[in-house]
Amino acid sequence: MARLSVAPRSADFSKFGTFLEDYQRRIQATPPGMCPVALQLDLLRAGGCQTCGKCVPCREGIPQLEALLQDVLDFNAGPEALDEMRTTAMAIRESADCAIGYHAADTFLAAMDTFEEEFVSHVSEGACQEGVEQTIPCVTQCPAHVNIPAYIAMAGKGDYAGAVNMIRKDNPFPTMCALVCEHPCEEVCRRNLIDAPVNIRGIKRFAVDMAPADEVPVPAALPATGKKIAIVGGGPSGMTCAYYLALMGHSVTIFEGRKQLGGMTRYGIPAYRFPRELLDRDIRAVLSAGDITVKLNTWMHKEDEERICSEFDAVYVAVGAQIGKTLRLEGSDAEGVMSAVELLSRIGDDDYPDFTGKKVAIIGGGNVAMDCCRTAVRLGADEVTCVYRRRIDDMTALPSEIESAMQEGVEMMCLQAPDSIEVDENGHCAALITQPQMIGPVRGGRPSPMKANKPKRRIPADIVLIAVGQDIMSLRIGMPVKSRKLYEADDSLKAEGFTNVFVGGDCQTGPATVIRAIAAGKVAAFNIDEFLGFNHEIDYGVTPPAAKINDRTPKGRCEIVERPARERKHDFEGVEEPMSTEEALQECGRCLRCDHFGCGAVEEGWIQYV
């Protein structure tokens, strides 16, 4: 009689653990700029290795698809090969017995759609598209293309002022991004191949703590050009544009409608995440760059907008996304119901409402929703509930923000869609009524919620904060808009229909991250300079230091920690505790200097992305 076993007879899968972890590291470290056709061939081969060989679609179809794709990759196939590959993949997807064949083919078809131009280039031009090449991963992934390995090396040598100036070559807000950047650079860090990505944001925070931005002199401005540029909006994008234009010798005037500069970094990010005195450090440094005039409390009216277009040689519109979206809910006009942007904007001008003893419900699952949750706790709320129509895993907020909110006592009530707001006899909010949801098909990369056959839920609430997005404030100079009220612009950020108006940031792309707004301001500045007939080069006085031999010894990643929740939830002081010198130096030493080693290596005079 056969003896039963708890393990499969074919293999001891415990031995695959390390191999699978290494394979995952390889996927995580896939370099930006890699040929997507080559990457797809590797993924297809992985699917072929997994097939059991019992059904014809997997056994015969995947090898056929691999052979066709190899010819395309080698530039040995004509346009007809694309149709043949698509037909073969569709046949595999529709007839494979199990998910292995289905997934391999479905992923392949998605890649053909996503990278259609690259596939066409291989069969029509016999080459990859222009710009498809492996580059320095972190630099490429950073929207502003900051030379990250260089400033890490400088920080590691103790040259903190040099690190700050290296950052300012491409980003004049080093302090801002040290605290609130979502650090996409870390996602593709090649250190993933060894242990975990370098804590790039943590190193930047350490550098600006050691060398405050307003104490590190900015480069000297070039001789005056006599040209005048107007910047509409004093947020990260507008001020970035002003910084570089002023360094080029142009005269810049910033028109800001609010009482203070900073845009949504002041009026949308709570002080506990980004203390105002640290924001002001960056602003003081930017304003020291040259001929910059600031006009606060200056909202643009039609006659003002028409005037600046005629009086200034160029105009950059960067008004951001400063209007909170609302929901069409019964009772949404009740007292106590407000948008997240409205609350955070009040706090930006030091107007702190008192939520003592109140029950607060926040609708949304993004970073702004988490900001409102944690702000409500600090305003004295008795109960704070985050209501979200999807699962917690589907929230767009950073996982660290969600975890911090929960540590501070916020309850996450997921799979609950807002239905209406209960109003008492005095016209005040009394409760949020929700309709339970169940998770359904994946659409747009995330599972979609759908109405569940469950009774509605009543969540007592004195305050309801709606954090479901932001809208653009319209200008009246006739700038064309596209979907979602966004302003239209060409690749150089010039507004369509205007000769001297450029537009960028959230009002052109939609609400995005701070670093993307900064990147837009940088691009606009260099394009405006060229539009005015110049091609200025700025001497920042810093060069990348020589690289040391890589330290490839696996080490744990040093994380930035927050003050204990029992302490931090009672005030608006900064929550982060910066790295120690020992932690920062260890992180600097983990950098593999991809700007000198590997296929991302470049010469010392490497290209600046503008």
Image: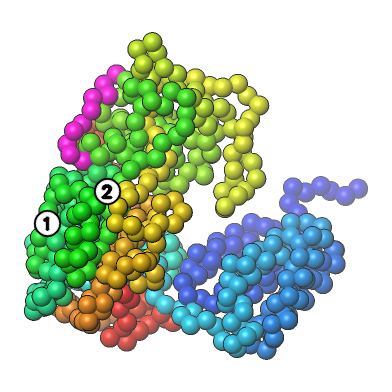
Query: 556 or 97: nearer the eye?
Result: 97
Label for residue 264? 2
Name the quadrant of the C terminus. bottom left
Calculate the distance from the C-alpha at mark 2 to the C-alpha at mark 1: 17 Å
| Residue type, numbered disc 2 | Met
Name the residue carrying label 1: 294
**Which residue occupies 60% across, 72% down?**
116
Residue 591, placed above or below residue 411: below
Whether residue 172 is visible: no
**Which residue occupies 64% across, 41% down?**
440
Query: 208 or 274: nearer the eye?
Result: 274
The residue stretch that appears in magenta: 348-357
Q: x%, y% of residue 488?
A: 39, 62
Inspect the magenta stretch and tell me whether residue 291 lies in it. no
Q: x%, y% of residue 342?
A: 29, 36
- In the rendered structure, the answer to whether residue 36 lies left or right of residue 182 reads right
Front label number (2 vs 1): 1
- In the rendered structure, the answer to whether residue 574 lies left or right of residue 428 reads left
**Which residue occupies 56% across, 27% down?**
435
Q: x%, y% of residue 265?
A: 25, 49
Q: Residues within 10 Å of mark 2 (few under 14, many from 20)?
A: many
| Residue type, numbered disc 1 | Val
**Which residue occupies 82% across, 57% down?**
97
Please tell me whether the stretch drawn in magenta is mainly helix, strand or loop: loop
